[in-house]
Structures are given as C-alpha cells and as structure tokens.
Image (spheres, grey):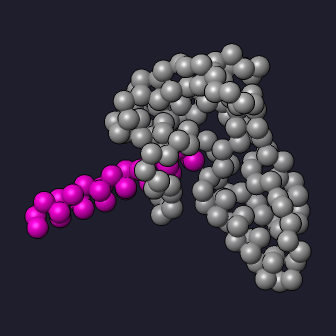
Amino acid sequence: MLRTGQSTVGATHLIKVAVETALGLRPRIDVYGTDYDTPDGTCIRDYIHVADLARAHSAALAHLRAGGASETFNCGYGHGYSVLEVIEAVKRVSGCDFAVNLAARRPGDPAAIVADGRRIRTTLGWEPQFDDLDTIVGHALGWERKLEGMRAAAKSLGQRR
C-alpha cells in the first residue's frame, strides 16, 4: 500500500466518499443524477491515482528546474468511469455493500470530463503507473483503513491521559 492519500475531513470526492461509506463512516452515498447521456446515466470522470498525480507534479517541477517553460497540462488517463462504476468497484474491492441514494442532478454538472494527457506525456515524459480502477480503489481503501487506525490510536491515547 502507498503512504499517500486524502485526509480531508468532510471531503466530497467520489472515491473517498464511497470508501468512507464502505467502511461505515457515512450512512450512504448520494448519486447526483441518473439521466445523463452516458451508458448508465451517471456522470463520467477521469479518476487519477494520487501517486500518478504526485509524479506528474514532480515531473513538472523537474521540467521547470531544468529551465523549461511554464506550461499547463491536463493530467489523466484519457478515459473515464461512471459514478456507478466507481461505486461498484468500491463494493467489489472492499467486499462491503452499502446504501446508495439516487438524487437529482446538481446544476452545471457536465455528463463527462476526461483528460487528454498526450501533451504531458510527450513534453515531460510522464507515464501513469496506476491506470486501473480497482487498484485506485484498493489503495484508497487501504489509506482510509490506515487513517481509521491512526484515529483510533489517537483516541485511545487521549483517553489514557
């Protein structure tokens, strides 16, 4: 398991919310919109592993330090997964079933957003290492379990004082 992940309390990112729901930290997950023009009616996004994103930032910094021009790059895998595909992956990888609430669309949400990462690959030589939804979810799940262990240890330590 990697040692990086998101530790923001109350985060709204789909994978983190779904993993927290699988671990019983949230009562349910809300799916905002099931009537988009996508195969299953839910939004599609290009979810990137946090370690791949960190490596992209490192490559950009190395580029700048070597005298390269400041540029803007899209960073992603070039394909996406729907909200329901992500939720099913979290259920599959965690082995936990959890409540899913189908809700109305949020205003302004586009049906699909997928990055075109060709420029970052050619300019910086960045290549993703974790372009697999089950791997992304498995690492996120491991990270959340680690956070829960740390919170439990801190709570236990606080009660002993």
What is the x, y in percent for residue 113? Answer: 76, 38
Image point (43%, 50%), residue name: 9
In front here: 127 or 119?
Answer: 119
Outermost residue to the bottom: 66
In front here: 32 or 150?
Answer: 32
Image point (25%, 55%), residue name: 152
Q: Quadrant of residue 161?
A: bottom left
Q: Quadrant of residue 156?
A: bottom left
Q: Answer whether residue 43 is visible to the viewer in this image.
A: yes
What is the x, y in percent for residue 29? Answer: 47, 29
Image point (37%, 55%), residue name: 147
Indicate whether residue 34 is drawn in magenta. no
Q: Quadrant of residue 74?
A: bottom right
Start-end of magenta stretch: 134-161
Outermost residue to the front: 107
Q: Is residue 10 left or right of residue 42?
A: left
Q: Is residue 42 left or right of residue 126?
A: left
What is the x, y in percent for residue 91? Answer: 47, 31
Q: Answer whether residue 40 is visible to the viewer in this image.
A: no
Q: Is residue 91 left or right of residue 114?
A: left
Indicate whether residue 140 is drawn in magenta. yes
